[in-house]
Structure formats: structure tokens, C-alpha cells
């Protein structure tokens, strides 16, 4: 597993970085997002959606668990925080192995259902405007993708 780091100094930089990543993602790609409340997971996801060609407003699916958006490929945004105490298989593999890109917030709560190949992103709050992004590539594909977007 290769690890990369990148710092953002504004929400605009975060969204531009995520948009650049979104432009390169393909059907079947899975990203996990970890970070405290307010770290910037939704801000990042909005940029990612823009890069995937999503026109609708993206917001956190905290109460619905999953939202689906149309872009150049389907975009599935999951927030599985409320599944912390659940071990029920809710059909996640249909999304993980499907025709779209999936982002999962709080992925540790469904670790047993996640495919091994994914890009794990942790967002660390540094101060009001600065975030540290730690990207862990679990495959050569994601490692090359990280090298490409981080230049």
C-alpha cells in the first residue's frame, strides 16, 4: 500500500483537487473518506462529483445512507455512520462492483463488506482553512492515479 499526502489551504483548493481526481475516476472505483465532523468530507465529495459531471447539488446522505447522482458514470455517495452497530449486508456489493464510482464516508463501520481495491482518504483538520489529506492506495491502479493527480 502506497501512502501520499497533500495539503489544502481552502475549500476552493479542496474542491479543485477532488474535481481533478473525479475527472480521472472510472466505473467500479471505490473511495473511502474518513475524518472528523467538519473536516471537509462533503466539500471534497462536491468537488469529486463536479469532476464526474454531476450537475445536481451534492450534500451529505447522513439520514438516507446513500444518494445516487447522474454524471458521466453513476456516482454513489454513502454515509454509513448510522450503521455502526449493524452487521447486516445491505447489498453494498451491487454498488462496489457496479457501473459507477462510489464514495463511502465512515467506511470503518462496513469494513467487512468493502473490496480490497480502493483509495482510502483521511482528511485531518489542521486549522480553520488547512486540511491534510492522507491518501492510501491499495493497488497499483490507485497508486498510479495518485501520482498522476499529485504530479
Image (cartoon, helix red, strand yellow):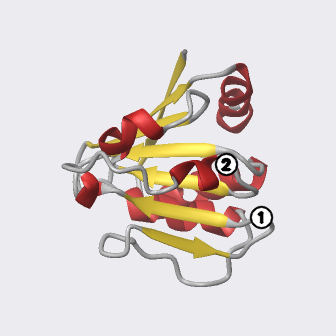
Residue 30 visible: yes
Residue closest to the eye, 124 or 118: 118
Residue 78: name its quadrant.
bottom left
Cα distance between the residues tagged 1 and 2: 14 Å
Left or right relative to 64: residue 149: right
> In which quarter of the view is residue 126 placed?
top left
Say if 5 sits above or below 84 in the image.
Answer: above
Q: Element at badge 2?
A: helix
In the image: residue 105, left or right of residue 23: left
Name the outermost residue toward the top: 1
Q: Which quadrant would the C terminus be assigned to in this image?
A: top right
What's the mark number on residue 137? none
Q: Residue furthest front?
A: 88
Measured from the top left, where is residue 80 in percent x and y? 34, 56
The location of residue 86, given as percent across then percent down, is: 25, 50
Residue at 77% across, 49% down? 26
Query: What residue is shown at x 71% (from left), y 47% (from top)?
Result: 28
Residue at 61% in and 48% down: 96
Front residue of 135/86: it is: 86
**Quadrant assignment for the N terminus:** top right
Q: Which residue is mark 1?
A: 73
Q: What kind of element bears circle 1?
A: loop
Q: Is residue 65 above or below residue 100?
A: below
Looking at the picture, how far across and down is residue 119, in whole percent?
56, 35
Q: Is residue 132 visible?
A: no
Which residue is more in the foreground, 86 or 39? 86
Q: Earlier in the sequence, mark 1 or mark 2?
A: 2
- Residue most toward the bottom? 56
Mark 1: few, some, or many residues within 10 Å (few <14, many ≥20)? some
Q: Which label was assigned to residue 21?
A: 2
Is 46 positioned to the left or the right of 52 in the image? left
Amino acid at each position: 500500500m502506497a501512502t501520499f499526502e497533500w495539503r489544502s489551504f481552502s475549500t476552493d483548493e479542496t474542491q479543485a483537487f477532488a474535481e481533478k481526481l473525479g475527472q480521472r475516476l472510472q466505473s467500479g472505483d471505490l473511495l473511502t473518506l474518513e475524518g472528523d465532523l467538519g473536516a471537509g468530507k462533503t466539500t471534497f465529495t462536491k468537488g469529486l462529483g463536479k469532476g464526474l459531471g454531476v450537475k445536481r447539488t451534492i450534500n451529505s446522505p447522513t439520514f438516507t445512507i446513500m444518494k445516487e447522482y447522474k454524471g458521466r458514470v453513476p456516482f454513489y455517495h454513502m454515509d454509513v455512520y448510522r450503521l455502526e452497530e449493524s452487521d447486516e449486508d445491505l447489498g453494498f456489493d451491487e454498488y462496489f462492483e457496479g457501473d459507477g464510482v462510489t464514495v463511502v464516508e465512515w467506511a470503518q463501520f462496513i469494513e467487512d463488506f468493502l473490496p480490497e481495491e480502493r483509495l482510502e482518504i483521511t482528511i485531518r483538520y489542521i486549522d480553520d482553512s488547512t486540511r491534510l489529506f492522507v491518501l492510501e492506495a491499495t493497488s497499483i491502479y490507485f497508486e498510479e492515479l495518485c501520482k498522476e493527480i499529485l504530479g
